[in-house]
């Protein structure tokens, strides 16, 4: 029975807590840490059978009975807490991204070297049943040699300009998932990135130095190509689709909806919109994600998304940011590795 | 916090136990009873935080701390245990059917009269997200006045002839769900039934006096029509679809699959088969079902499927059985009410 | 070059004329006959390169240069003109039905006996690309042994009560196409018919002695089953679908629309309605139909829908009419053959 | 009755001839010219009711009874014949592209200036029912302000390296249709192009100086974005889809297939591949195209695709070619206008 500590009880920390309580048989959460812990949160923890709550995540790191931690705190703390947790010998699941600074990510990778610590990065979409089925089709050879990867990724509502300003920019905040998805679906590394950016949704986002819409093309090391289209606002909800085209065909997945009902009437044939946002769309994926982290720890097998994958997605995100600003294709080789 | 006892720890008893443990906040299972309880089952109960196991369901009925019971034992025990549980003042969720004998069902209805006991029958498909969305479209007036209800219901693999012989016949064992679905989707009562039966899958089922394939048409009290097609074997898995057609249009739902991936290749465009069988297809529906039972008890609101609905589906099943044997349309008025 | 006369220049006569002019290389229409011929019609004929128009179809039958006739006049004239055309030695394409009277149809079959005349009945749906692809899948063994045939057939708008009164009734006027489709898709003969009829669209149709909605089930000679659901009114247009289910799977076809565009917006994901009615839906099928008639004449090969098929569909229609009136299953053996 | 001459009786010349003969009431083809005319072709022309054939297209230009010409000869002759036809006062439908040389296209535009000659360029996809329905949704405001246009365009089989070498390159030979489609669907002009090119299908095409796969992104004048993905080979046939995303939603269209039949079996649910190639996919679009050209001449209304559109697509194609070779985004302003 693996003993787990949760660091950060915000939205995603709660999602993981719930997943472990509901679905994971061979793990138990013993402590939740959050600096802003409330009585409601304490009660919620109790109802979920969690023994301890604390304002100080050090209580978790110093607890010798805790085997693994989930770092669900704010992004700017991920790298530092990761280092401390590594020093404490805990296995680590860290929400994406490890950091936006390559140096800090590398410090984590270096600290992990020569340890037997499992370190997993939370790219939840890799655990979605649809994207997995596309990847499975690719691995089964159904599309042959990969030639073009296409990803559509649109959020229902734009963030505030304030959020955008401190988010690291759309490519590190939102597209980073799509960069990881390109690597996941293709099984390849990215060689070059070009961005056609735009501010079409909210001028304030542009004034804050960010963009809200973009088409990003990527050249992979085999010569295959990839393209991502992003928008921070989508009138019909969260739009997350992918297609992998190759020498023998294509595998594509679409959105999920609350039902597959079709209403035929005088004004056409109408189905439901996609599930609204990531909590609706990826709830099952989040559960699979933590299950697989725990399985990797328990069985001492490789984690499905390691720290190097976390680094690589950030490097592509930085390359995209440079391309967006400089209006030129940027080679990954230009970005610190 | 509602305290619950589970009577019968077979497949469906386990499903409900898991659903309550995972999803239901305001209920706790205190005891599981099963005459064939094993050490594995006891350990499983423990892992799910259930305090007691017993071979004797009377331990549950006599426990004054238990508020409600789920009757998940074999069909031939449903009515008798229901009567005992009513006498013990427990709220009751009873797996379908209450019984195949109308007299026994009526004894349960009579015992419930003038009590405040909640009694719910487990027609799980009413809680499926797709069928619910069809019903919601009907209730929202999107199809106008209901005119034709169509239900397709096919099982992946036929039962053994032995099972068929003691099942009460296909119409009471399998089609009963579809009869309830006709009532649920239309909001109407059935007036007449006609069956075109066939033995096309396994001659041994025919020799056992049952059928394995049928098309059943129903006349509803408003004059609207319904049709069900059934087969005990389906090469591509569980096939459960519905369509309601009316004066303003139609609402239809299809099967769910493990993913929505489409592979386009030289041999066509291929998607996944439907989810294999009822445990895969209706897992979420089962959880919703027990949640709504518990909510009805906790909030003292009507249960979504009452004992009268359980009776009516059996009456239609008996009418269908008569039609199948006698080769003529059978009025519901011919069947004891 | 086959020389053709068109008897009857109403809607369907014009459709066939156009099809032959546009698509058929080895046939030429030399004469069109219609008792109510107008100057507009004469001009239309001229524009289509047709040499002669006449009020008297005898001019066609007596023209030794004409090889084949298309009988597109009103239903009550089909049988008599067929007999005259047979006597004149013409090959014949006759719109469905030959007649509603079995004796008259048999007179045509008898007259054809021992001649080498090609006689084809216009069941146009057999030439639709979608229904043909279902039939092709069945013939290719993709569904295995046929077990259940399902046909949905709904017209956009009901006829007038006057039309209904003299139409022969819905089963001979509308469902006759579906009866033929059951035979076409299954490759089997019908043994028994049961109808659940209803008047849900227009009470005046009921007062005229007809019905406007029905679910019809059929038992085929192999023991396989079929079901047809009909409505004379459909808010979203012409609804014509089919499914054949068998031991190895199912083949199903849906409606066609003017485009496959999907609009995703705040109110859902919307596609186009089906094509409005038979002229839109089956325009290509009509062309294929006459092409295949002409090819059968030119190549002296069997016609795809012979007079016996025309007879059989009418027999099933009569059996359905009896079932509808008498409320009992009717064996085809009860109907004159 | 418009009198038409066809210049060039190759594949596309025959397609247009057939369309006019079959569908167009107010036009007649009087002469077909082709330098390699054969007896078979002469007979084919006769069967289609065309009075004259000639090896010399000058016979058409000099015939005062001919009102309009369709230039279906090889691409390198389009501009010169266009100039001669303008001088002869004929209305002109010219297959795409007018030329690959901007100077030659401009000479045609200049010659047209101050004449009342109708000059239409054959971008056939604009007349496809699906793409038109997307455009109609955009014009009807269903997607709001256009933000991202996505086009997928893949051919079933690659051309020979020899063809590629003299084709002007993939961007002028194949993508030119997609560039026009971006302009058509968005209603906007292109400002900048970036290409990620690849040779993934046939190394010989690369050796010939061309590419066979590409992802092309475009910035439009409003700031909206567009992306095209191309491949010269597609295992499942011709793949031509589009999506327009905007502030209120998205409109998307897919491929057409020979039927909409779905076969459900043990190995999944399978539908048909897309129609094989452009002749199958766009046959109806070709007919609509010439109908609309003739209607524009007869009614003296603007042609739906004018010479300026023909120029603009070539300019974008040249910009893409430069981007592909130089690996940088290219502004349309860099290309001669």
Image (spheres, coloured by chain):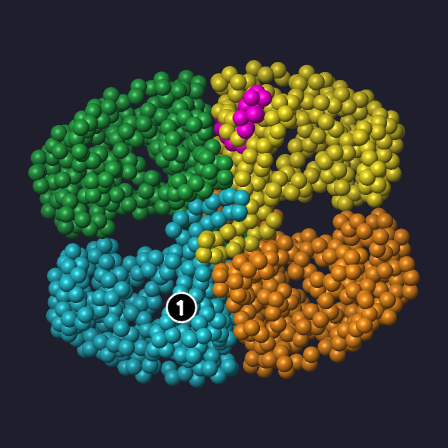
Chain colours: A green, B cyan, C orange, D yellow
Which residue is depicted at the point 38% across and 84% down? B336
- Image side of residue D62 versus residue B13, left or right: right
Which type of secondary structure does the marked residue at label 1 adopt? loop
- Image side of residue B22 versus residue C310, left or right: left
Q: Position of residue C148 (x, y in %)?
A: 52, 67
Q: Residues within 10 Å of mark 1 (few under 14, many from 20)?
A: some
Which residue is depicted at the point 44% across and 72% down? B202
Q: Is residue C272 above or below residue B75?
A: above
Quadrant position of the N terminus of chain D in the picture:
top right
- Image side of residue B65 versus residue C73, left or right: left
| Closer-to-camera residue (C303/D122) | C303
Asked if residue B60 can be seen in this view, the reply is no
Asked if residue A223 can be seen in this view, the reply is yes
Which residue is depicted at the point 51% across and 82% down? B328
| Closer-to-camera residue (D53/C125) | D53
Q: Position of residue A31 (x, y in %)?
A: 13, 42
Q: Label 1 marks which chain's residue?
A: B
Q: Is residue B309 above or below residue D131?
A: below
Provide the residue span drawn in magenta: D202-231
Which residue is depicted at the point 67% across and 72% down? C312
Residue assigned mark 1: B158
| Closer-to-camera residue (B303/C222) | C222
| Closer-to-camera residue (A9/A164) | A9
């Amino acid at each position: 029975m693996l003993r787990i500590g949760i660091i950060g009880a915000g939205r995603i920390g709660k999602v993981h807590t719930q997943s472990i309580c509901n679905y994971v048989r061979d793990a138990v959460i013993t402590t939740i840490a959050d600096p802003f812990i409330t009585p409601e949160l304490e009660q919620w923890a109790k109802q979920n059978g969690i023994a301890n709550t604390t304002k100080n995540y050090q209580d978790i790191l110093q607890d010798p009975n805790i085997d693994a931690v989930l770092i669900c705190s704010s992004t700017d703390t991920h790298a530092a807490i990761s280092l401390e947790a590594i020093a404490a010998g805990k296995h680590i699941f860290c929400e994406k991204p490890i950091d936006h600074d390559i140096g800090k990510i590398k410090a984590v990778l270096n600290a992990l070297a020569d340890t037997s610590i499992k370190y997993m990065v939370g790219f939840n979409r890799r655990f979605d049943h649809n994207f997995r089925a596309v990847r499975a089709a690719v691995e089964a050879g159904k599309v042959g040699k990969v030639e073009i990867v296409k990803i559509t990724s649109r959020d229902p509502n734009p963030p505030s300009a304030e959020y955008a300003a401190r988010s690291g920019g759309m490519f590190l905040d939102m597209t980073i998932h799509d960069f990881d998805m390109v690597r996941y679906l293709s099984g390849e590394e990215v060689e070059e990135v070009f961005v056609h950016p735009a501010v079409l949704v909210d001028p304030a986002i542009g004034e804050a130095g960010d963009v809200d819409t973009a088409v990003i093309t990527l050249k992979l090391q085999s010569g295959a190509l990839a393209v991502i289209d992003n928008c921070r606002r989508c009138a019909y909800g969260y739009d997350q689709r992918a297609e992998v085209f190759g020498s023998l065909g294509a595998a594509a997945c679409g959105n999920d909806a609350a039902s597959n009902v079709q209403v035929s009437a005088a004004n056409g044939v109408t189905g439901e919109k996609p599930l609204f946002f990531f909590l609706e769309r990826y709830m099952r994926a989040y559960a699979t994600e933590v299950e697989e982290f725990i399985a990797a720890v328990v069985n001492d097998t490789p984690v499905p998304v390691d720290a190097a994958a976390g680094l690589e997605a950030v490097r592509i995100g930085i390359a995209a940011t440079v391309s967006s600003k400089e209006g030129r294709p940027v080679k990954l080789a230009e970005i610190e590795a």
